[in-house]
């Protein structure tokens, strides 16, 4: 689905409020999409909340209900339908089948509608057959049951979200924020997504391929972290950055710093740095008229060839094609990366200590 050109109305997002819903997850699409504005301050999205049966109170997992203003018929008017999770999925969670009421509600969805699931909302899409043959994720604690019930779905329990084009799924709870910000970035570019993230006071980008859950003991009091080194690196992405210099910012050895970095961020310093440079390049390609060579230098890749290799590895598109498609109005098409967004980055840019190209002759030691 491409959001190209001027639209007579904002992109309409319908959120399906299941019985036993989690209020936090129900509120994510409202908070993220309703905040998004174009350059003239106009809303880019309209968000509707729809009940499975009819408008009215819907039970939650908290000690209160929410009053939902729309019935399932409103799903037929949506460009995107989002299904948050619920603790009362019943036969969907236990047997992998829809209740008659839920099946009737989903029948209102028009062909070609973009479908999004947050956390165990993926069970609903899978039970309806929307995920057959597709990659998908869900909350790590439910992944084994999900795969058992839906063997035709290619489940990846180790990522925050999966973008398979017109069907997207996220891991548990807060990963729904990451997925919605990813959709903003896909639809309207990094500037819009970053503005919403800033007002929501959340990180503007967590890679879809980042691990859901990193098992580790609680940090010791006063234990040094790597935040200062990350902030230092972000301020000089355009320069060659030595891994040892990042480690010295935290008064650590390279080995200790790399281990601590992985514990905190979930990826190696080189992988993280490459991703930040890719995001910087995306922003410059979208928002400036700089030449490809200048974008490559400002983003820290050194050469246009190096930047092209990294953008193709992470996004599946060349810098020139990204800029051309984005400026034609099809930001969604500019983000041609499909499947596990960012998941295969480790295979492309290497683990800690392996080569990470950021210009001629650069390695992670000089990323």
Image (tube, grey):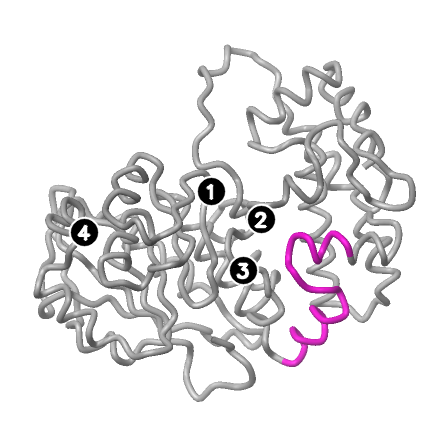
Label 2 with label 1: CB-CB less than 8 Å: yes
Asked where in the image residue 259 lies, by quadrant, the reply is top right
Q: Is residue 216 above or below residue 191?
A: above
* Image quadrant in which the C terminus is located: top right
SS under mark 4: loop
Which residue bears the numbered disc 2?
Answer: 342
SS under mark 2: loop
Q: Is residue 318 magenta?
A: yes
Asked where in the image residue 256 lies, by quadrant, the reply is top right
Asked where in the image residue 321 lies, by quadrant, the reply is bottom right
CA separation, marks 4 and 2? Answer: 29 Å
Residue lying at 45% horizontally and 73% vertically, measured from the top left: 43
The local crowd at label 1, few if under 14, some if 14 to 19, many if 20 or more residues have their Cα within 10 Å, is many
Q: Which badge, 2 or 1, comes first in the chain's sequence?
A: 1
The local crowd at label 2, few if under 14, some if 14 to 19, many if 20 or more residues have their Cα within 10 Å, is many
Q: Which badge, 4 or 2, comes first in the chain's sequence?
A: 4
The local crowd at label 4, few if under 14, some if 14 to 19, many if 20 or more residues have their Cα within 10 Å, is many
Q: Which region is colored magenta?
A: 309-328
Residue lying at 14% horizontally and 59% vertically, measured from the top left: 98
- Judge depth for marks 4 and 2 and give the one in front: 4
Residue 190 in the image, given as x and y percentages of width and height: 61, 61
What label does residue 100 carry, if any? none
Which residue bears the numbered disc 4?
Answer: 96
Q: Which badge, 4 or 3, comes first in the chain's sequence?
A: 4
SS under mark 1: loop
Which residue bears the numbered disc 1?
Answer: 159
Label 4 with label 2: CB-CB less than 8 Å: no
């Amino acid at each position: 689905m491409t959001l190209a050109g001027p639209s007579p109305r904002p992109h309409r997002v319908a959120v399906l409020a299941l019985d036993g819903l989690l209020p936090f997850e129900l509120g994510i699409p409202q908070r993220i999409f309703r905040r998004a504005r174009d350059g003239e301050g106009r809303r880019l999205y309209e968000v509707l909340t729809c009940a499975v049966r009819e408008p009215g109170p819907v039970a939650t997992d908290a000690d209160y209900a929410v009053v939902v203003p729309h019935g399932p018929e409103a799903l037929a008017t949506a460009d995107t339908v989002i299904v948050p999770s619920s603790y009362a999925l019943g036969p969907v969670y236990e047997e992998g089948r829809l209740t008659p009421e839920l099946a009737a509600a989903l029948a209102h969805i028009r062909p070609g509608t973009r479908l999004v699931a947050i956390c165990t909302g993926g069970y609903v899409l899978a039970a309806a057959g929307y995920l057959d043959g597709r990659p998908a994720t869900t909350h790590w604690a439910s992944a084994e049951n999900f795969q058992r019930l839906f063997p035709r779905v290619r489940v990846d329990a180790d990522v925050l979200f999966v973008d398979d084009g017109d069907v997207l799924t996220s891991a548990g709870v807060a990963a729904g924020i990451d997925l919605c910000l990813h959709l903003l970035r896909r639809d309207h570019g990094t500037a819009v997504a970053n503005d919403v993230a800033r007002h929501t006071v959340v990180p503007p980008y967590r890679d879809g391929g980042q691990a859901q859950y990193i098992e580790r003991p609680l940090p010791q009091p006063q234990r040094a972290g790597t935040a200062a080194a990350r902030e230092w690196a972000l301020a000089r992405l355009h320069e060659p950055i030595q891994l040892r210099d990042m480690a010295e910012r935290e008064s650590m050895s390279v080995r200790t710093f790399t281990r601590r970095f992985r514990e905190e961020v979930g990826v190696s310093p080189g992988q993280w740095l490459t991703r930040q440079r890719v995001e910087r390049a995306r922003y410059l390609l979208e928002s400036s008229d700089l030449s490809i060579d200048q974008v490559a230098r400002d983003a820290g890749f050194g050469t246009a060839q190096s930047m092209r290799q990294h953008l193709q590895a992470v996004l599946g598109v060349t810098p020139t094609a990204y800029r051309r498609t984005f400026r034609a109005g099809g930001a969604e098409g500019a983000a041609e990366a499909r499947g596990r967004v960012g998941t295969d980055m480790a295979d492309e840019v290497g683990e800690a200590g392996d080569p990470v190209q950021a210009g001629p002759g650069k390695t992670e030691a000089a990323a």
